[in-house]
Amino acid sequence: MDALIIINQAAAKARRAWPIIQQQLKAANFKFHSYETKAAGDATKKTRSALRTGTTTVAVVGGDGGGTQGSDAPRRA
């Protein structure tokens, strides 16, 4: 299963960093799919859904709490 990378669009640094990170992952042939958050709680919902369907690796690009949301999902999945 590909990794899931959640991009927290509310974080300005994430918006600038994601294109660079994405390019590097693709250059390394790293298999992933990405999801850009749209609202508060989005990261948690997407992480839970991904874990239920077999995703084992989740990373978050962002800096305003998105990582905390996503990291809470495994305990409640």
Image (cartoon, rainbow, N blue to C red):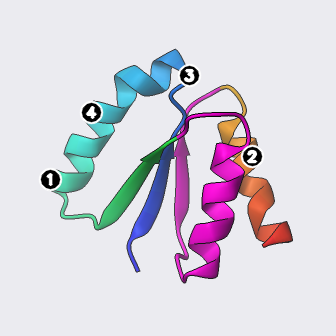
Instruction: Name the residue at 36% across, 34% down.
Output: 18
Q: Nearer the viewer, residue 12 or 40?
A: 40
State the separation of the CA atoms marked 2 and 1.
Answer: 29 Å
Q: Where 43 sits versus 74, above or below? A: above
Identify the residue position indicated by label 2 in the image: 69
Disc 4, SS: helix
Q: Residues within 10 Å of mark 4 (few under 14, many from 20)?
A: few
- The label nearer to you, 3 versus 1, is 3
- The label nearer to you, 2 versus 4, is 2
Identify the residue position indicated by label 4 in the image: 20
Question: Which mark is on residue 27?
Answer: 1
Amino acid under disc 4: Ile
Magenta segment, which residues?
Answer: 37-63
Disc 2, SS: helix
Instruction: Name the residue at 46% across, 53% down.
Output: 5
Does label 2 or label 4 sit earlier along the sequence?
4
Does label 3 or label 2 sit earlier along the sequence?
3
Q: Residues within 10 Å of mark 2 (few under 14, many from 20)?
A: some
Q: Where 53 sits versus 34, above or below? A: below
Question: Which mark is on residue 11?
Answer: 3
Amino acid under disc 3: Ala
Q: Is the Cβ of the residue at disc 4 closer than 8 Å to that at disc 1?
A: no
Instruction: Name the residue at 62% across, 69% down.
Output: 49
Q: Is the Cβ of the residue at disc 2 closer than 8 Å to that at disc 1?
A: no
Q: Is 5 part of what is drawn in magenta?
A: no
Q: Is the Cβ of the residue at disc 3 closer than 8 Å to that at disc 1?
A: no
Disc 1, SS: helix
Q: Where 16 sits versus 76, above or below? A: above
Image coordinates for residue 29, horizontal then vertical, percent: 18, 64
Q: Where 31 sits versus 43, above or below? A: below
